[in-house]
Amino acid sequence: MSKARLEAFSDGVIAIIITIMVLELRPPASAELAGLWHMRQEMCAYTLSFVLIGIYWNNHHLLVSAMRRVTGAVLWANLHLLFWLSLIPFATAWMGRLPTNPIPIAVYGTVLFLDAIAYTILQTTIIGADGRGSELARAVGHDFKGRISLASYAAAIVLAFVNYWFSYALFIFVALLWLVPDRRIASRTAAQ
Amino acid sequence: MSKARLEAFSDGVIAIIITIMVLELRPPASAELAGLWHMRQEMCAYTLSFVLIGIYWNNHHLLVSAMRRVTGAVLWANLHLLFWLSLIPFATAWMGRLPTNPIPIAVYGTVLFLDAIAYTILQTTIIGADGRGSELARAVGHDFKGRISLASYAAAIVLAFVNYWFSYALFIFVALLWLVPDRRIASRTAAQ
Amino acid sequence: MSKARLEAFSDGVIAIIITIMVLELRPPASAELAGLWHMRQEMCAYTLSFVLIGIYWNNHHLLVSAMRRVTGAVLWANLHLLFWLSLIPFATAWMGRLPTNPIPIAVYGTVLFLDAIAYTILQTTIIGADGRGSELARAVGHDFKGRISLASYAAAIVLAFVNYWFSYALFIFVALLWLVPDRRIASRTAAQ
Amino acid sequence: MSKARLEAFSDGVIAIIITIMVLELRPPASAELAGLWHMRQEMCAYTLSFVLIGIYWNNHHLLVSAMRRVTGAVLWANLHLLFWLSLIPFATAWMGRLPTNPIPIAVYGTVLFLDAIAYTILQTTIIGADGRGSELARAVGHDFKGRISLASYAAAIVLAFVNYWFSYALFIFVALLWLVPDRRIASRTAAQ
């Protein structure tokens, strides 16, 4: 019951976050293809953020479906994650408009870094509520992907000031890393 | 469980996509009927897109309710469809504002074409997960409507450069083709 | 199952419609109370539309919970209602900005009239699917409230050109008429 | 059933309210950190409102899950609460832009005060429907936190005209007061 409503609210917020980014894509004033071409960077930023938020939804879904208990701490860790996710549209719009400037790219990386921290906190809080010996704790294990993501985002923030292509490459690398849903949790929950 | 959340998230995203288009309809500055008349093309574009997204929701609903297994591939094929659907408000706003120019009409047709491709991929992925001999595979059959839609959108893109009325006629033709929900799936799922 | 998803999608769309109206309320540029006072008409229009959409949600909820079968016709009648409801934010914004001009008031009345028509069509379609002797058919009966609402909206459209206070009085009258939920359906469904 | 849909609709509206505030955060025109620094007050206002709406969602969730009966009065008390919550993005945007002016701060406090009144009305209505001897009535008890919140908001409105830091301190005080979910209800519903 509590779990169903936590999922419903999270789904609602994530669905809105992933969709309102499209409001930033203003149709060109002219009817020329050049107008679309001019928006290519905003389109790429939108696509990247859509994929990254889709990954969060996907992993959130696996995490919550493996969860056994909803505590107050879990509710707040979940809202904390939603807060940082809600800043992605803002960071996406800034980076999409000024795609070759280090500051907006570093800010985008920072928001992603804080999203990843918030996700890790939620995961830890759920494992704490479920107990160390829980299925989820075993499934998450050493959480290599989570650690690699955090390190990649940290590197992307710094490298934005060296060469912004490094940052974009790291954002895409993390997206590819997670595009395969977390089989460890998935296989275990499927086996239930 | 997994299926319920896939539906809930898709419903949320589709509900937002279908509704935020209305934010593009800016009320006229004057209190004259002429102001509304000036918006007739934007209104028509909104109505067309509302109907087309409504058709996707309807068919998505039948497809998912006939689905037996949610795999990682199904989740991603679903997000892929939602991505292309999320571009409809953008394409609608552009075409609605410049309704007699070939490029915005061709871009609108392209977004619809890619939506139809993404829907076909989702359908194929679900059938792949459920097994060739599944109910859904038999219900979809040769998917004549899907093929006719794809061909119509492709033709609409090209014909936008000849005479845009051909393109509009084809968009409306596809809408009418699907306004009757897919009885093949519906009748079989109803019989369950 | 089908019914649950029809409700979920309708809830999503109505929730978005009722909430995005608030995006029209732009905070005043100055920090004076006069700025708020200047918005009093937009605030009133927002409140009126919020109440009217709330009434639709409430009645929709009672209607669908009494429904026994979801057919293709019911799905489309429902989408048709959502389409006309989705125009309320547009009409509200226009009337709120030009609250003493007959045309925006008449257009607002027309949208409400078409909402009421669409609701009646949905109700008739559901009764048609459930069967004449169904509980819902008996509960709706002669539908006096629905007929009075339609007549009031029609009168409000015409009277906007005579004296707009008549139109506002009629809008408020219909809101008050429905603020009490439809006890006929409610009492019967509660008794199930 | 009725209860599930009341929750689903409330979740949808609250999810939209909490998320559309981010649309007010316009990315800076320049690519400088100074642009972000210039937005610090809007960011703080967004964060404060996010937390306060999160608290409402959390408490609403506990309140409704402990509820036994959905009456017409409960539905309307719930819509009444959603109405006042829907004004938070407006008040947040005004205060965020003019953060040192008493009027926008007092208006923000007034909206929060009215939210708290509406929540109290909903709570009282649910207890009235469930019966005086209900679990919820015992769990809520004297509702000290609710009374302290109301008094704090009232004080914040007045003190905005003395020194606005008092108002901000009171808003943060109420947020901290509620950040711990209402253990009285939570512990009792958990025990069910």
Image (tube, coloured by chain):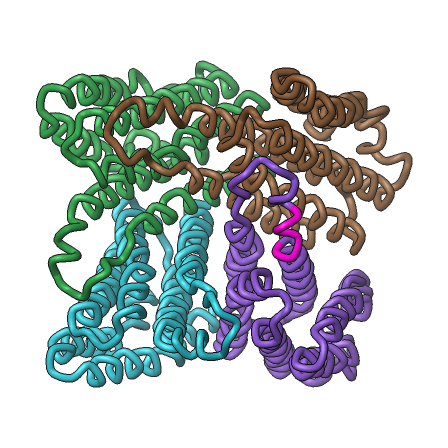
Chain colours: A purple, B brown, C green, D cyan
Is residue D143 found left or right of A73 in the rendered image? left
Nearer-the-camera pick, A99 or C139 = A99
- Residue D123 is situated, as x and y percent measured from the top left of the image, at 27, 62
Q: Quadrant of residue B67?
A: top right
Q: In this rendering, is residue A59 above or below C146?
A: below
Q: Quadrant of residue C5?
A: top right
User: Exactly how many numbered labels are in the figure?
Assistant: 0
What stretch of residues is rendered in magenta?
A: A37-42
Q: In this rendering, is residue B158 above or below A108?
A: above
Is residue B134 found left or right of A97 in the rendered image? right
Q: In this rendering, is residue C118 above or below D157?
A: above
- State whether residue D182 appears in this view: no
Q: Quadrant of residue A115?
A: bottom right
- State whether residue A38 appears in this view: yes
Is residue B144 found left or right of D64 in the rendered image? right
- Residue B23 is situated, as x and y percent measured from the top left of the image, at 42, 42
Say which residue appears at 33% left-offset and 60% top-offset: D89
Say which residue appears at 12% left-offset and 53% top-offset: C37
- Residue D27 is situated, as x and y percent measured from the top left of the image, at 47, 65
Say which residue appears at 77% left-offset and 69% top-offset: A185
Q: What secondary structure is the magenta-colored segment mainly?
A: helix
Nearer-the-camera pick, C145 or B85 = B85
Is residue D19 found left or right of B79 in the rendered image? left
Q: In this rendering, is residue B123 above or below B178?
A: below
Taking the magenta stretch, the answer to whether it contains residue D172 is no
Taking the magenta stretch, the answer to whether it contains residue A39 is yes
Say which residue appears at 42% left-offset and 18% top-offset: C124
- Residue C23 is situated, as x and y percent measured from the top left of the image, at 35, 51
Q: Hey, which residue is sitting farthest right in the picture?
A: B132
